[in-house]
Image: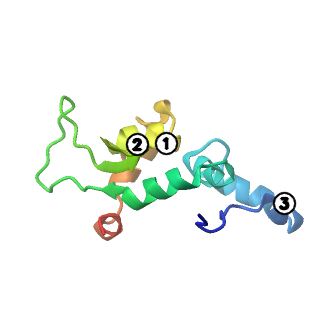
Amino acid sequence: MDVGGHIHIDWDLLNELHEGDRCQEIIGFNTPWSRLFDIATRPSYCELTVEFLSSFVFNRPPRDYVEDPAQPFREITFRLCGVYRSMTLREFACRSGLYMEEELDTPLYTEGIRTLPRETLEVWER
């Protein structure tokens, strides 16, 4: 099954153009952005990737939802290896490797993720 080529940052080309250092300063080292871009260069199993991407759903909490640590709202649902799974956005951020556990209580995660425009969040619901 062909799902197209991986798109990733071509660091060799950026270095050849003398822009590698500038881009690395913007993205940073070992940041959520750098980890996201690194996913494209990791080996993956095509069938699992297609299964995950085709079943991934972001469920926005209701407008009147009040956060309850004892029963967190599970925003993320997907199927992997034939099993449906659901988890909080926080769990997904950590388990996917985009954020490290210690980053989850920093303003980068706690404020940035909640200040996305509603229109942006609605794209993931479609």
- Please provide percent x and percent y for residue 31: 59, 44
Residue bearing the label numbered 2: 92
Q: Quadrant of the N terminus?
A: bottom right
- 28 is higher (above) or lower (below) than 1: above
- Please provide percent x and percent y for residue 20: 79, 59
In front here: 119 or 38? 38
Q: Are marks 2 and 1 in contact (CB under 8 Å)?
A: yes
Q: Residue at x 31, y 56 (%)?
A: 58
- 57 is higher (above) or lower (below) than 123: above
Residue bearing the label numbered 3: 12
Element at label 2: helix
Q: Residue at x 26, y 44 (%)?
A: 74
The label nearer to you, 3 versus 1, is: 1
Amino acid type shown at disc 2 = Phe
In front here: 61 or 111? 61
Drawn side of residue 62 relative to residue 10, left or right: left
- 8 is higher (above) or lower (below) than 99: below
The label nearer to you, 2 versus 3, is: 2
**Can you tell which mark lies on residue 96?**
1
Q: Quadrant of the C terminus?
A: bottom left
